[in-house]
Image: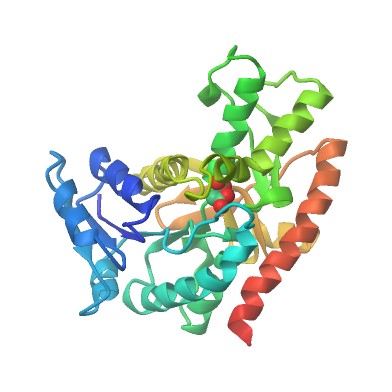
């Protein structure tokens, strides 16, 4: 129970996410914020027979502050999406300042909320969010997550496809570590449960498909944007995990976090040479409680990890330096 604030709710991820939240009956209150349309979306959602009260706020008259006030969970999907020919990094110029401004308001209005960043490029926007909170003196790494759940969803879905439908995607558990773009996305099929039997060639194709799954959608939408409904699905899966944790259940999910601020993360940050990394975390009532070890990697995964770290370091530096100039 409690309040969730969806920032960017008129977008093509935000709106289906708001529907999933309203339909779930997990919340007492849902607030929607965007630069257009959200009062109407809120009215529309209020015709659904679940208990959550939905309100929509536009930027005028302190709308962002009102949307965030009292929020237990904030999900940020605001910002522009990719078009063909663009990488997620190309979005940084526009989305970095959007994230900075939203997190400045989070810092002053609901610093104790758990914040989830969906806005791309996640590898860089999460450092922008963290630096903004840090500047305001309220950064608590346990409460800030970059949402990488779509990579986890794709890792099991695409392997199930490759296995010819002999297994339900949801029966497969594949850890995905690293970041949320291209080579930084590292699905660990050597740790899949149950064991995945694919040839080296099939495995290479599946790994590539997970790493570049976003591009598959951008291409298929032919200029109309990038992943929206599957991202809303994945974002909601992460929100559900947070809500289960709040109700006292033991929950683990992968997310992109600031390692040094979470128990178990300091050592991993030193080992990997990066402060931000997507990894399986244990989640409790107040956010991440523990970073879980990444476990044994195959020879190929070790090579892919090197490539992931190389790109990730640049992405992190981009986010951090945006805030430190
Ligand atoms: C995705 O993984 O599909 C999203 O991050 C959207 C994108 O730009 O690829």
Q: Residue at x 65, y 38 (%)?
A: 210
Q: Residue at x 41, y 48 (%)?
A: 242
Would you identify the image quadrant in which residue 107 lies? bottom left
The answer to which image quadrant residue 42 occupies is bottom left
Looking at the picture, the colour scheme in use is rainbow
Observer-nearest of 122 and 294: 122
Q: Residue at x 83, y 35 (%)?
A: 298
**Residue 297 or residue 17, whichever sits in front:** 17
Q: Position of residue 37 (x, y in %)?
A: 24, 60
x, y percentage for residue 173? 59, 30
Looking at the image, is 264 positioned above or below residue 60?
above
Height in image: 118 above or below 177? below
Q: Which quadrant would the C terminus be assigned to in this image?
A: bottom right
The answer to whether any part of residue 47 appears in the image is: yes
Residue 271, image x, y percentages: 79, 58
Spot occupied by residue 7 in the image (x, y as percentages of width and height)? 35, 62
Q: Residue at x 76, y 53 (%)?
A: 308
Q: Is residue 105 left or right of residue 224?
A: left
Q: Nearer the viewer, residue 121 or 274?
A: 121
Q: Say which of 143 and 84 sits in front.
A: 84
Give the left or right position of residue 215, taking residue 204 as reference: left
Q: Considering only vertical position in the picture, is 188 above or below 130?
A: above
Look at the image and tell me whether residue 148 can be seen. Answer: no
């Amino acid at each position: 129970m409690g309040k969730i604030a969806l920032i960017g709710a008129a977008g093509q991820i935000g709106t289906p996410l708001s529907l999933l939240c309203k339909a779930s009956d997990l919340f007492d209150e849902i607030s929607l914020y965007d630069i257009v349309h959200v009062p109407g979306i809120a009215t529309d959602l209020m015709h659904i027979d679940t208990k959550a009260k939905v309100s929509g706020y536009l930027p005028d008259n302190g709308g962002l502050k009102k949307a965030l006030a009292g929020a237990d969970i904030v999900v940020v999907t605001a910002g522009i999406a990719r078009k063909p020919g663009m990488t997620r990094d190309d979005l940084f110029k526009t989305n970095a300042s959007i994230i900075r401004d939203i997190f400045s308001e989070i810092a002053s209005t609901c610093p104790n909320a758990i914040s989830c960043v969906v806005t791309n490029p996640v590898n860089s926007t999460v450092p922008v969010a963290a630096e903004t909170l840090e500047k305001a003196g309220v950064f608590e790494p346990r409460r800030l997550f970059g949402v990488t759940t779509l990579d986890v969803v794709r890792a099991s879905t695409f392997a199930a496809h490759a296995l010819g439908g002999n297994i339900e995607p949801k029966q497969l558990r594949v850890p995905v570590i690293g970041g949320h773009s291209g080579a930084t996305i590292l699905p660990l099929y050597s740790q899949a449960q149950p064991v995945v039997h694919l040839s080296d060639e099939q495995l290479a194709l599946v790994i590539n498909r997970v790493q570049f799954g976003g591009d598959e959608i951008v291409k298929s939408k032919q200029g109309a944007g990038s992943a929206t409904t599957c991202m809303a699905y994945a974002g909601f899966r992460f929100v559900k995990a947070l809500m289960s944790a709040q109700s006292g259940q033991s929950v683990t999910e992968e997310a992109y976090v600031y390692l040094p601020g979470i128990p178990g993360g300091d050592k991993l940050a030193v080992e990997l040479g990066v402060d931000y990394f997507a990894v399986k975390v244990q989640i409790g009532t107040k956010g991440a409680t523990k970073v879980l070890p990444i476990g044994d990697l195959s020879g190929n995964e070790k090579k892919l990890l090197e490539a992931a770290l190389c790109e990730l370091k640049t992405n992190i530096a981009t986010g951090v330096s945006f805030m430190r100039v």
